[in-house]
Image (cartoon, helix red, strand yellow):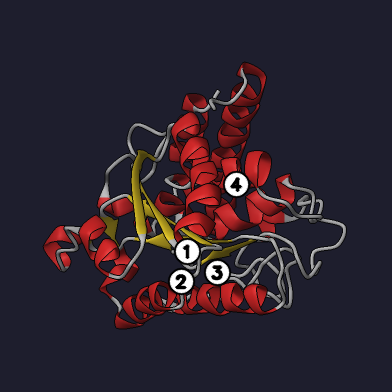
């Protein structure tokens, strides 16, 4: 079922706000990863504001839905969406990456409420998500575990160990959303270490696979809701390959390798914010 017109408009505005905050955060410290944060805004917005069951006033609620962000460098997005969701005020987000700030370059779950696990080294979040899904099943919780994964980390062996384990243990309560923006630290994924055919690889490990436009709110919402039905019914984990654009929302940043880990200067920030009205 498509999102209502009201909800679609709300999510669209949330994504604009997220992108503005991401850019301001990395500009303030002249450091951070804007490109991969901006590519996943629609994914995060749909999860937190249309799908997930959570309570920001009780972030450790045992049977909460969990979003594990394995692409640990996308912290500008993580902190922005958690503030928007009400876990904290977020009026100090511009202290990002400063000494003493809780908002470090990679997530620290002991310092920021709502962060499910500390990540950074590629593949860490994937293994944690599998453990969380197993734990929820053992506890007979009805929650779901969501994993936001980068395509670059599929070049890590630990990622495929986790994928293999999830299929082996029939984790129908686990949904992975792959941010397929095709760019990693210093180039295109297919030139660095080719990943395709990604869908067939997941299927070989007993996963259900869907592919969507990762910036289409309705497609994302429908695909995620479909996993709630397919996962338990077919007794297998689900992956949504979300085709996205690195630096989405700002023309001069889109599909540019440079913006993986470079912060905009003041002039670039001003020009970018003009596009996000």
Whichever of labels 3 and 4 marks the residue nearer the N terminus, that label is 4
Whichever of labels 1 and 2 marks the residue nearer the N terminus, that label is 2
Q: Nearer the viewer, residue 244 or 131?
A: 131
Label disc, if present, on residue 170 of the rendered structure? 2
Whichever of labels 1 and 3 marks the residue nearer the N terminus, that label is 3
User: Can you tell which quarter of the image residue 106 is in?
Assistant: bottom right
- Packing grade of label 1 (10 A; few <14, some 14-19, many >=20) is some
Q: Where is residue 26 in the image (x, y as percent from the top left)?
A: 53, 54
Label disc, if present, on residue 105 of the rendered structure? 3
> SS for tag 1?
loop
Reading the image, the residue beneath label 1 is 235
Q: Distance between the residues labelled 1 and 2?
A: 5 Å
User: Can you tell which quarter of the image residue 155 is in?
Assistant: bottom left
Label 3 near label 1: C-beta < 8 Å? no
Q: Distance between the residues labelled 1 and 3?
A: 37 Å
Q: Residue furthest top?
A: 5
Q: In which quarter of the image is the C terminus?
A: top right
Q: Where is residue 244 in the image (x, y as percent from the top left)?
A: 35, 43
Residue at image position (43%, 39%) is 268
- Packing grade of label 4 (10 A; few <14, some 14-19, many >=20) is some
Q: Where is residue 171 in the image (x, y as percent from the top left)?
A: 50, 69
Label 2 near label 1: C-beta < 8 Å? yes
Of tags 4 and 2, which is closer to the observer?
A: 2
Q: Position of residue 46 (x, y in %)?
A: 58, 40
Q: Is 16 drawn above or below residue 202 in the view shown?
A: above
Residue at image position (68%, 74%) is 109
Reading the image, the residue beneath label 4 is 47
């Amino acid at each position: 079922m498509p999102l209502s017109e009201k909800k679609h408009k709300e999510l669209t505005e949330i994504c604009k706000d997220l992108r503005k905050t991401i850019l301001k955060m990395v500009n303030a410290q002249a450091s951070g990863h804007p490109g991969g944060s901006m590519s996943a805004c629609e994914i995060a917005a749909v999860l937190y504001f249309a799908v997930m069951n959570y309570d920001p006033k009780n972030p450790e609620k045992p049977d909460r839905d969990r979003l594990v962000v394995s692409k640990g460098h996308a912290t500008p997005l993580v902190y922005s969406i958690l503030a928007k969701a009400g876990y904290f005020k977020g009026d100090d987000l511009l202290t990002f990456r400063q000494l003493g700030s809780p908002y470090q370059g990679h997530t620290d779950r002991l310092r920021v409420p709502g962060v499910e696990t500390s990540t950074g080294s590629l593949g860490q979040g994937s293994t944690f998500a599998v453990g969380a899904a197993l734990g929820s099943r053992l506890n007979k919780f009805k929650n779901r575990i969501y994993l936001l994964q980068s395509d670059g980390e599929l070049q890590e062996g630990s990622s495929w160990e986790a994928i293999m384990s999830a299929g082996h243990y029939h984790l129908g309560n686990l949904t992975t959303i792959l941010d397929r923006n095709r760019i990693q630290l210093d180039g295109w994924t297919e030139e660095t270490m080719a990943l395709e055919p990604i869908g067939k690889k997941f299927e070989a490990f007993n996963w259900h696979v869907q592919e969507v436009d990762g910036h289409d709110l309705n497609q994302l919402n429908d695909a995620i809701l479909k996993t709630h039905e397919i996962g338990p019914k077919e007794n297998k984990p689900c992956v949504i390959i979300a085709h996205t654009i690195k630096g989405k929302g700002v023309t001069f940043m889109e599909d540019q390798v440079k913006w993986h880990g470079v912060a905009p200067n003041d002039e670039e920030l001003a020009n970018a914010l003009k596009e996000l009205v």
